[in-house]
Image (tube, rainbow, N blue to C red):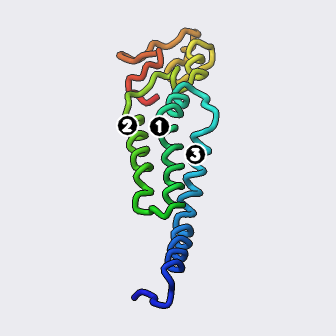
Amino acid sequence: AANEHLSPEDKGRLLAERSAVIMAPVRTDLAALLRTVSGRAATPHEAAFQRGPGRSLRDAVAAFGDAIRRGEYATSWTPLAAAQREIAAFAKQSVPHLPHLSPRLADLSGSRIPMPGLAPDSTGQQLPAPEGASRDGGGGGGGG
């Protein structure tokens, strides 16, 4: 039952206040997410994310906030849904090579620092890689 004693302006104000309270945690979480993905890129993979899906995410969060301020609650999620699809597509790309994900870790492969699967045997010789394995960090899906 609608409150007939409230003016349309009061109803609009109450709806805006209610929506602001409901959306406050969402906006807080989105702001925290933006701080996480907007920092200085430490790897080429992070830089690629920031140029692509990261930029779309920043734009979507801004559009979300604008829509909420205008009271366009029904359409406020549309930009975020589009950014989510772009992030999902980025995540489904083939696994990048180790130098793209972590250049510093990739540089260790030629060092004398022991690495899983590359430990020297008792004579100081490097153990052979398992059949079909690659030591160039080029993926292979082995998960290591």
From the viewer's side, name the closer residue of 120 and 42: 42
Residue found at x 44% / y 63%: 73
Neighbourhood count class around disc 1 (C-alpha, 10 Å): few under 14, some 14–19, many 20 upward: many
Chain-order first, disc 3 or disc 1: 3
Q: Nearer the viewer, residue 134 or 37?
A: 37
Instruction: Classify 137 as above or below 10.
Output: above
* x then y, percent, for residue 84: 42, 45
| Residue type beneath disc 2 | Ala
Q: Position of residue 70 (x, y in %)?
A: 51, 61
- Secondary structure under tag 2 reads helix
CB within 8 Å, label 3 to label 1:
no
Q: Which residue is mark 2?
A: 89
Q: Mark 3 falls on what kind of element?
A: helix
Say which label, 3 or 2, has the lower sequence index.
Answer: 3
Q: Which residue is mark 3?
A: 34
Q: Which amino acid is tagged 1?
A: Pro
Comparing marks 2 and 1, which lies closer to the viewer? 1
Question: In the rendered view, does 12 fall on the left or right side of 2?
Answer: right
Q: Is residue 144 above or below residue 58?
A: above
Distance from disc 3 to disc 1, alpha carbons, whole Å, reads: 12 Å
Image quadrant where residue 138 sits:
top left
Which residue sits at x=52%, y=18%?
Answer: 118
Q: Where is residue 123? Give x, y as percent.
A: 57, 9
Which residue lies at the image location 50% right of the left edge and 50% below the top edge? 63
Left or right of 51? Residue 93 is left
Residue bearing the label numbered 1 = 53
Label whose residue precedes the other's in the sequence (2 or 1): 1
Amino acid found under the numbered disc labelled 3: Leu
What is the C-alpha distance between the residues marked 3 and 2?
19 Å
Q: Residue at x 59, y 51 (%)?
A: 31
Q: Residues within 10 Å of mark 2 (few under 14, many from 20)?
A: few
Residue 10 screen position, x and y as percent: 54, 80
